[in-house]
Image (cartoon, helix red, strand yellow):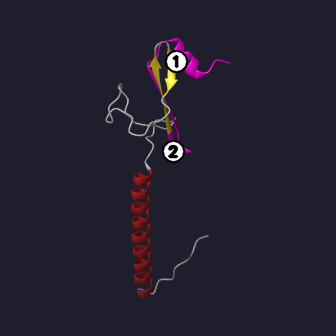
Amino acid sequence: MIKKLDVYQKYGVVGYYLYDPVRNHLSDWQARKSNLEIIEVMDNWFSPLLSAEDCQICQPDGEVFWTFVELGKKLKQVQKRAETAEQRGQMLEAKLRALGLELIKLT
């Protein structure tokens, strides 16, 4: 079986990026002479082909991967909305009780 990297190399692709979301690891291969060679150390490395604005890592369905910072912000937003909804529900329950209405819990 031919590997994707081999196909890319055969047809002259000048750069290949592989992101592993489980390990949060990005690998990069760049064309050197006639081969794609892995960039071993990517700390402070930038692609000569892409600017930071051009680079976007997406899931197979096209959704953009969120960074851990973005995920943390989203989590706080969701927690805040849940707290607000819970408080609103409790206020509505109290108003219904004050009106003499009985609540039925659905399971």
**Which badge, 1 or 2, is on the more N-terminal residue?**
1
Q: Quadrant of the C terminus?
A: bottom right
Q: Residue 92: horizontal and vertical position, in percent?
A: 41, 77
Residue type highlighted by circle 1:
Tyr
Q: Is residue 21 magenta?
A: yes
Magenta part of the protein: which range?
1-25
For the residue pair 94 and 32, the one nearer the viewer reads as 32
| Residue 84 drawn above or below residue 15 | below
Q: Please, what secondary structure does the residue beneath circle 2 have?
A: loop
Left or right of 58 in this view: 22: right
Give the residue type at disc 2. Answer: Asn
User: Which residue in the protein does label 2 denote?
Assistant: 24
> x and y percent of residue 46 in the render?
37, 33
Give the x, y percent position of residue 36. Answer: 50, 20
Residue 36 covered by magenta stretch: no
Q: Residue 62 placed where, x, y %?
A: 46, 35
| Image quadrant where residue 87 sits | bottom left
Q: Residue at x 31, y 35 (%)?
A: 53
* Residue nearer the viewer, 90 or 9: 9
- Name the residue nearer the viewer: 102 or 105: 105
Question: 60 left or right of 83?
Answer: right
| Residue 8 badge | 1
- Quarter of the picture containing the N terminus is top right
Q: Answer few, some or many: residues within 10 Å of disc 2's Cα (few below 14, many 20 plus, some between 14 and 19).
A: few
Q: Nearer the viewer, residue 10 or 104?
A: 10
Q: Horizontal placement of 7 versus 87: left or right?
A: right
Relative to 91, does residue 26 appear above or below in the rendering?
Answer: above
- Asked which quadrant contains residue 94, the reply is bottom left
